[in-house]
Amino acid sequence: MQLLICPFLCCRCKQPVSIVVEMDRILRPGGWAIIRDKLEILDPLETILKSLHWEIVMTFRKDKEGIMSVKKTTWRP
């Protein structure tokens, strides 16, 4: 099992899509990512991850921040 933890990594990057592409490249199917960031970053990331058929296992939102736990599936385009 692989685990990638991303605390506020995405808010430092102007292209969240590039982070998702790199996560998808690094993690094997069945690998997990825990992403903590601002809601304005997490909302588009969730859409991108769903389009890649990642499983959104848990989300938690409070104030302007949130945590999302996602699992990479075996789906490939």
Image (cartoon, rainbow, N blue to C red):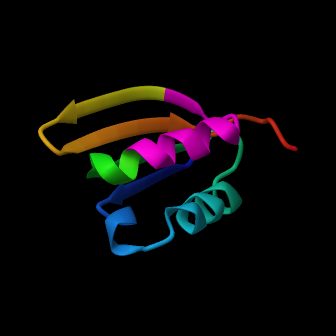
Q: Is residue 33 visible?
A: no
Q: Which residue lies furthest to the bottom in this view?
A: 13
The quarter of the rendered structure image containing the N terminus is top right
Which residue is more in the foreground, 44 or 3? 44
Quarter where residue 22 is shown: bottom right
How many numbered marks have been drawn onto this rendered protein structure?
A: 0
Instruction: Give the percent coordinates (x, y) of residue 47.
Output: 55, 40
Residue for point 38% across, 58% down: 6
Residue at the limit of the structure toward the right, as seen here? 77
Q: Horizontally, is 63 left or right of 44 in the view?
A: left
Q: Quarter of the image for the C terminus: give it.
A: top right
Q: Is residue 50 magenta?
A: yes
Residue 10 found in image quarter: bottom left
* Residue 31 image offset from top left, x and y in percent: 60, 43
75 relative to 30 in the view: left or right? right
Residue 76 among those drawn in magenta:
no
Provide the residue span drawn in magenta.
43-56
Question: Residue 56 location in percent, x, y?
Answer: 51, 29
